[in-house]
Image (cartoon, rainbow, N blue to C red):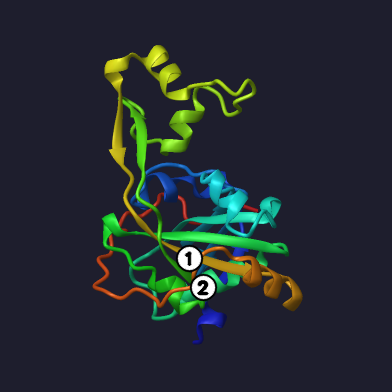
Amino acid sequence: MSIKKKYRVISVKTETVKEWFIAKHYAKRMPSISYCFALQNENQLTVGVCSFGRPMAHPLIQNAFNGHYQNDFLELNRLVTNDDLEKNTTSYFVSSCLKALPKPKVVVSYADTSHNHNGYIYQATNWIYTGLSAEFKDYMVKGYEHMHGASVIDMVGRSDTNGHLNKVELLKIRFGKENVYQVDRPRKHRYFYLIGSKNQVKHMKNNLKYQVEPYPKGRNINYDASYAPSIQTELF
């Protein structure tokens, strides 16, 4: 049986697959989700989940395409499947999810070098590789290590309306100076996927500020995704 006949990709409510993100994906936390999809087999059992949301990296949204497409930016922020799927099934899943997104859209995703990922699934589905993310230090707060660095900073306000807001000092005041510290943010392989008409995609490529680079290679080490969620069917 072909992959297309054996599997289907459906849009699902985030709540129905929440366990996949919290317990099965290596990040063990919920991302911000705008679109969520499930991969189901012929028995209508969910065997994979993929989600897209607004990127946390605000400068990336503002600058990656010379200010264009700021309202059309998404991040593929979670992708997790069962370990026993046939070859090319995950590629089929990702491609189907991308086709289901509204147009135009700029989609970014990352492969985490700290987990020995190179982004082979993005290479197999023809994403544009633009090198490693910049070296950066995040401010963290003890007890909030599960949060992204940008979310930690935003806990004391997202907007600097007066031009003098020092969020780091506000973090220290709110949580105590001894509880605020810096950590190196792991560098990640950065990939883009462009969705739109031929003219829109051409315009995106012409305005992409990052240099397109050859795909990275290396030994991929997969994390343990053997956890079996208790609910694997979509309720109708």
Q: Is residue 105 left or right of residue 129?
A: right
Residue annotated with mark 1: 191
Residue that appears at 27% across and 69% down: 220
Which of the two residues, 186 or 92, is positioned nearer the viewer here? 186
Q: Of helix, strand and loop, which one carries label 2?
A: loop
Which residue type carries mark 2? Trp
Q: Is residue 231 above or below residue 91?
A: above
Q: Residue 12: x percent and y percent?
A: 61, 54
- Nearest to the observer: residue 144 or residue 58: 58
Residue at image position (30%, 59%) is 113
Foreground residue among 205 and 27: 205
- The amino acid on which the numbered mark 1 sits, given as a three-letter code, is Tyr
Q: Look at 29% across and 20% down and name the residue there.
A: 179
Marks 1 and 2 close (CB-CB < 8 Å): yes
When the figure is inspected, residue 230 is found, relative to residue 191, above or below; the finding is above
Q: CA distance from mark 1 to mark 2?
A: 6 Å
| Residue 224 visible at all | no
- Residue 38: % across, % down: 54, 61
Callout 2 crowding tier (Cα within 10 Å): few <14, some 14–19, many ≥20:
many
Q: Which mark is residue 127?
A: 2
Residue 140, picture quadrant = top left
Sort mark 1 into few (<14), some (14-19) or many (20+) by Cα contacts within 10 Å: many
Coordinates of residue 48 in the picture (x, y in percent): 46, 62
The residue depicted at 57 percent of the width and 29 percent of the height is: 158
Dot 1 or dot 2: first in sequence order is: 2
